[in-house]
Image (cartoon, rainbow, N blue to C red):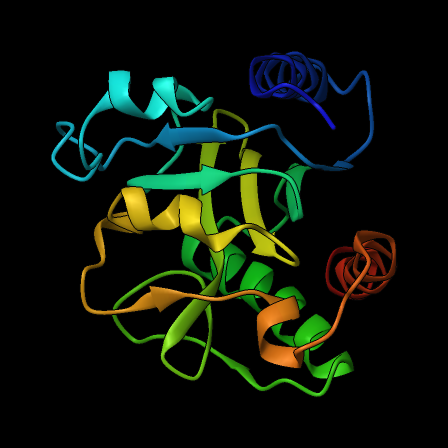
Amino acid sequence: MTPYAEGWEMQRELTRRRKRDEIPDTFLLCEHPPVYTLGRAAKDASNLGAGEEYLRSLGAEVFWIDRGGDVTFHGPGQLVGYPILRLKVHDTHAYLRELEEVVIRTLSDYGLEGWRHPDYTGVWVEENKICAIGVKFSSGWITSHGFALNVKTDLSWFERVTPCGIREHGVTSLQRELDRDVTLTSVEERITAHFLESFG
């Protein structure tokens, strides 16, 4: 469980070190306490529901950050992945599709069919989003930020905002789809295996 500000600063430091080739490619996995983050596509607070102060009054932090995408929620029961990679293939769309593929393969291990929406980045199960993706590409083709997979997340947090600015679809979790408890440890093992398959 990593406070968001601490995780964000860790990413920035690792990105600086990766640019200088002081560290190899690195893959961070963590959980965050309740926090709403707004990416570069969030031009204003229109998707923040009743607003920042209200969300803070519920016990959540709010950060305006430097990844792509709009507003999303991170919290307990959600597995968040931050790849700090130097991309060998300089194709941002291919990288996003590969991140989606890692999650789709992980869902398949649990008997769920994940799919890509033609209009939105992320991974879906039926008509609901189960994994949000928002990344940053720094000079030298270094990636940061990443994905947030709802494993056993309290989904009511999403009802207070318009997740990713998408009004016509809801959100879901592995636990909801499987109707049973799922441990983050088991999902972490599977997603790490598939990440290694994709990125070496």
Residue 160 visible: yes
In the picture, the quarter occupied by the N terminus is top right
Q: Quadrant of residue 46?
A: top left
Image height check: is 181 above or below 54?
A: below
Q: Position of residue 38 (x, y in %)?
A: 32, 30
In the picture, the quarter occupied by the C terminus is bottom right
Q: Quadrant of residue 189?
A: bottom right
Q: Position of residue 154 (x, y in %)?
A: 54, 50
The one nearer the camera, 94 or 178, is: 178
Image height check: is 6 above or below 2?
A: above
The one nearer the camera, 150 or 27, is: 150
The one nearer the camera, 1 or 5, is: 1
Q: Position of residue 161 (x, y in %)?
A: 27, 43
**Numbered circles on residues, count:** 0
Q: Is 142 on the left or on the right of 42, as rendered?
A: right
| Residue name at image x 29 percent, y 42 percent | 160
Image height check: is 62 above or below 26?
A: above
Residue 64 visible: no
| Residue name at image x 66 percent, y 11 percent | 13
Q: Which residue sits furthest front?
A: 58
| Residue name at image x 61 percent, y 74 percent | 104
Q: Position of residue 140 (x, y in %)?
A: 54, 28
Q: Is 74 on the left or on the right of 50, as rendered?
A: right
